[in-house]
Image (spheres, rainbow, N blue to C red):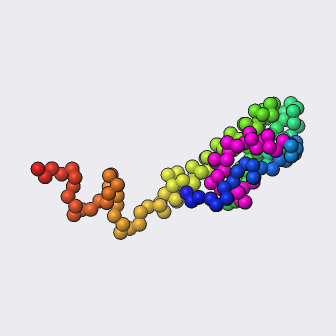
Amino acid sequence: MSAVANPATVAECLRVGAGFSQGDRNWIAEQFATLDARLAGFHADATELEVSVKDREARGQKVTLECWIAGRQKIVTTSAEEDLHAALNDVRDDLRRRLNDAKTRQEPRNNKRLRDTGQPEAGLPEAGPDGGDLDDDAPRADAGTA
């Protein structure tokens, strides 16, 4: 994977929506700090996070975390936990899982189109089990010559 010049961080990409104030933003960013490692593979200017809560501190409160990354589908995670701290942790963990799932789907091992195009080019020597080139003219290491 190529390095990103300006990696996304929660502190840089997080917006607070309905139900939260700007004063809550730093506290929420601290709760979501573990997402930084997962977001680092994306450009900060192409990544947005928004957290909102409906009916805060009431029965039936609903916390929503939305994530927009350029070139990908929007990811929305929700939690109906009654404790606000637990609900924030729930949406954070769900977003991390969904980002990991999305990354796994794009890896060649799990994506036939990428796997088929990732094969070595014709005419290049194929690597042997020890990492060296396989060459029909070279003596085999396992052949007994004594």
Image point 52% across, 59% down: which residue? 114
Image point 78% across, 41% down: which residue? 28
Image point 88% across, 37% down: which residue? 55
Q: Is residue 3 left or right of residue 142?
A: right
Image point 61% across, 46% down: which residue? 100
Residue extending farthest to the left is: 146
Q: Is residue 119 visible?
A: yes
Asked which quadrant contains residue 20, the reply is top right
Residue 52 appears at what percent x and percent y?
83, 44
Residue 35 lies within the magenta run: yes
Nearest to the observer: residue 136 or residue 35? 35
- Range covered by the magenta-colored residues: 24-48
Asked which quadrant contains residue 58, the reply is top right
Q: Is residue 69 visible?
A: no
Residue 66 lies within the magenta run: no
Depicted 135 relative to depicted 40: above or below: below
Residue 6 appears at what percent x and percent y?
67, 59
Q: If the image is split into quadrants, where does the N terminus sit? A: bottom right
Q: Is residue 30 left or right of residue 7?
A: right
Q: Main secondary structure of the magenta part?
A: helix
Residue 70 appears at what percent x and percent y?
70, 59
Give the total of numbered labels: 0
Nearest to the observer: residue 55 or residue 128? 128
Residue 78 appears at what percent x and percent y?
76, 41
